[in-house]
Image (cartoon, rainbow, N blue to C red):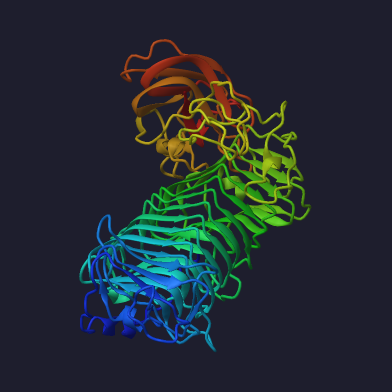
């Protein structure tokens, strides 16, 4: 999401609510009945139900109380705002009773929020039909649950509710926004948050601007350089134990499901179809802003409008350790996923794996705004049946930002392209069908038919079997071993750590094929290098393991060149069983592209960095820019030494874009 936010507005209605005198308390563990079709007001019993929400709103309910609304009836132009809170094991409940259709709560634009809670906790809201359509757009919600300067509120359940037809303000985002279901934290004097929230099995349709929305003013932290709360900000205090599961969200003016400012949220098994339908702001389908450890899985997202974002998913500003897995994205005009960190913010250590994208258009993988860090995109299938920029890298990202492994790009469209994809890190991907301009190089690229069962034929997340691999596929057991592959593939098949995976989203191979996993380079340092150029360019030895293939280690040439052989010794920070070395020559073009390309080489592994023994591997690299893998009998050690005996053209230099240890 482009990191431009609107100005905050004050909520006078909420602020005024603090001044309301406490209403009378209701009896504990009592069930109260509402029938808006009853002619008499009644006493709240089933035999004599209330016929409006006025008596409900005037009472403070206590632990275990229930408010039941008669099915088949309509309560028009009213707000439901019961007071009080339940307790652990005895929540208060709003539900339906009787037979027939869910009770209709039609706000008709006469109220801002049809169902509201304010500084309350331990509530369940179930089985209601809620709408709030007014004569003209205004700030409106279906279910609006608010906390303000009141500490932690615990236990909220919104289930089986149908929210629809809310003509809210289309272009007002963030707080005081319009939404179907909205959890909002206000104030900045007492740290406040929601905890233990489940929004499950609801339908939200024809709503402006958000479908399901979380927001707080307690958002500021070093990872977020662009908070949108002005002087009302508070220090980072995220919502916790948030689950958004099994909801159907359709025809949404802006964003469909957003879990902003959360820690460890789980968003799964939701169906989204049709978002950014009317809003003029950019919008995506399912995502979070300023979040930690969010898991998005088993969601199906389609129908995103426009290329003002318009992707099904989004790794946005302040995303730390977000995972998108086992999702199905299709027919989104904007693409599959947006990678958009705000300038100066931190978005890092994210994973996108075992997803399927079918006929997404626009920018399939869109790298814009500020650069992300260490995002791994692996074992996905991209079926490109309509023209798209398959990779759109317009912010200068390199391999330190996004890495692509074991994906299948199945391209049948003739007008697609890759934009600046070559600066990213690629390994063991399959590019089949059409080969658009800008297709990246890949040291383990396959262009063979991956033998998918029926690509392009998925009709839903549960009917995507066309992306299974067939026996004899060249994609079988040919992928890069991933450090954190997860436990299963898109279809539920087991994925075993340490084994060479199949490419794509289906793990057909069940026998473990040991493979060359890449040893983590976190904590790597240079123990010794005999030569490096630091005057005419940044040719520091540390560039050989910085994750950026556009930077290189280059031996000295200013004021005279140091003679070959050259060597670099690397402290890997811990002891590993090392069975290989990967050398990526410099990847730039021009007349000097081959300068320093290693010819003859020697590889050593040591436990102490002093006693190296004999070389574990020797040989001569081919004279090209492709990635070189050297295999040898595993040796345990903490130190890795690459000795460049010669350069391919006999020059005195040595250079390297990246060096890896393999296990």
Outermost residue on the front side: it is 47
| Rendered location of residue 92, percent (x, y) | 31, 65
Query: In the image, 257: left or right of 570?
Result: right
Left or right of 236 on screen, residue 520: right
Q: Nearer the viewer, residue 387 or 608?
A: 387
Q: Is residue 268 left or right of residue 593?
A: left
* Relative height, residue 186 to residue 455 (above, below): below
What residue lies at 62% left-to-right and 34% top-to-bottom? Answer: 503
In the rendered view, would you say 230 is above or below 134?
Answer: above
Q: Is residue 27 left or right of residue 294?
A: left
Query: Where residue 287 sits: x, y (%)?
Result: 48, 58
Residue 588 can be seen, yes or no: yes
In the rendered image, residue 467, in percent from the top left (x then y), is placed at 68, 40
Q: Nearer the viewer, residue 532 or 80?
A: 80
Asked if residue 559 shows in the view, the reply is no
Q: Residue at x 27, y 78 (%)?
A: 59
Q: For the view shown, which residue lies furthest in the bottom direction?
A: 135
Farthest-out residue, top: 614
Residue 543 is drawn in which quadrant? top left
Image: 292 above or below 660: below
Find residue 211 and report its horizontal and vertical position in percent: 50, 68
């Amino acid at each position: 999401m482009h990191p431009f936010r609107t100005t905050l507005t004050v909520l006078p209605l909420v602020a005024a609510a603090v001044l309301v005198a406490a209403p009378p308390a209701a009896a504990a563990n009592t069930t109260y009945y509402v029938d808006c079709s009853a002619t008499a007001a009644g006493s709240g019993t089933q035999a004599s139900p209330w016929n409006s929400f006025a008596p409900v709103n005037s009472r403070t309910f206590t632990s275990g109380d229930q408010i039941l609304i008669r099915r088949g009836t309509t309560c028009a132009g009213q707000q439901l705002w019961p007071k009080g809170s339940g307790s652990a094991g005895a929540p208060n409940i709003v539900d339906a009773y009787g037979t027939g259709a869910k009770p209709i709560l039609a706000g008709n634009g006469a109220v801002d929020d049809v169902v509201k809670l304010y500084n309350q906790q331990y509530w369940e809201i179930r089985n209601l039909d809620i709408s709030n359509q007014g004569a003209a757009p205004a700030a409106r919600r279906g279910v609006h649950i608010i906390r303000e300067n009141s500490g932690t509120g615990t236990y909220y359940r919104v289930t089986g509710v149908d929210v629809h037809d809310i003509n809210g303000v289309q272009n007002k985002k963030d707080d005081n926004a319009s939404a179907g279901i909205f959890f909002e934290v206000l104030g900045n004097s007492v740290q406040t948050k929601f905890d233990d929230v489940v929004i499950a099995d609801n339908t939200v349709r024809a709503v402006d601007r958000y479908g399901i929305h979380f927001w707080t003013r307690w958002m500021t932290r070093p990872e977020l350089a662009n908070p949108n709360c002005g002087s009302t900000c508070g220090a980072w205090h995220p919502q916790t134990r948030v689950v958004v599961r099994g909801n159907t969200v359709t025809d949404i003016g802006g964003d469909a499901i957003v879990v902003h400012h959360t820690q460890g949220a789980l968003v799964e098994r939701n169906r989204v179809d049709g978002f950014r339908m009317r809003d003029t702001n950019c919008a995506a389908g399912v995502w979070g802003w300023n979040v930690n450890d969010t898991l998005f899985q088993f969601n199906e997202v389609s129908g995103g409008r426009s290329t003002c974002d318009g992707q099904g998913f989004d790794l946005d500003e302040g995303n730390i350790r977000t995972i998108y897995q086992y999702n199905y994205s299709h027919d989104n005009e904007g693409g599959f996923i947006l990678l958009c960190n705000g300038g100066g913010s931190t978005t890092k250590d994210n994973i996108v794996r075992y997803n399927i994208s079918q006929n997404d258009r626009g920018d399939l993988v869109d790298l814009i705004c500020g650069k992300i860090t260490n995002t791994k995109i692996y074992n996905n299938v991209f079926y490109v049946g309509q023209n798209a920029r398959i990779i759109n890298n317009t912010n200068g990202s390199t391999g330190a930002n996004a890495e692509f492994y074991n994906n299948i790009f199945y391209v049948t469209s003739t007008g697609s392209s890759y934009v600046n994809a070559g600066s990213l890190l690629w390994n063991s991907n399959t590019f089949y069908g059409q080969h658009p301009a800008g297709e990246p190089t890949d040291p383990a690229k396959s262009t063979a038919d991956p033998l998918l069962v029926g690509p392009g034929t998925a009709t839903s997340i549960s009917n995507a079997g066309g992306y299974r691999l067939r026996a004899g596929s060249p994609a079988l057991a040919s992928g890069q071993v991933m450090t954190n592959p997860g436990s299963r593939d898109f279809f539920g098949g087991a994925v075993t750590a340490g084994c060479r995976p199949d490419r794509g989203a289906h793990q057909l191979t069940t026998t473990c094929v040991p493979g060359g996993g890449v040893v983590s380079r976190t904590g790597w340092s240079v123990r010794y290098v005999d030569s490096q150029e630091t005057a005419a360019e940044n040719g520091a030895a540390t560039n050989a393991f910085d994750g950026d293939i556009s930077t290189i280690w280059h031996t000295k040439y200013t004021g005279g060149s140091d003679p070959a052989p050259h060597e670099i010794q690397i402290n890997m920070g811990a002891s590993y069983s090392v069975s290989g070395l990967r050398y990526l020559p410099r990847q730039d073009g021009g007349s000097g592209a081959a300068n320093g390309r290693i010819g003859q080489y020697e590889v050593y592994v040591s436990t102490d960095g002093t006693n190296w023994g004999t070389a574990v591997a020797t040989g001569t690299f081919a004279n090209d820019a492709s990635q070189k893998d050297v295999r040898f009998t595993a040796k345990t050690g903490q130190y890795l030494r690459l000795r460049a005996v010669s350069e391919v053209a006999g020059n005195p230099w040595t250079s390297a874009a990246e060096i890896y240890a393999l296990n």
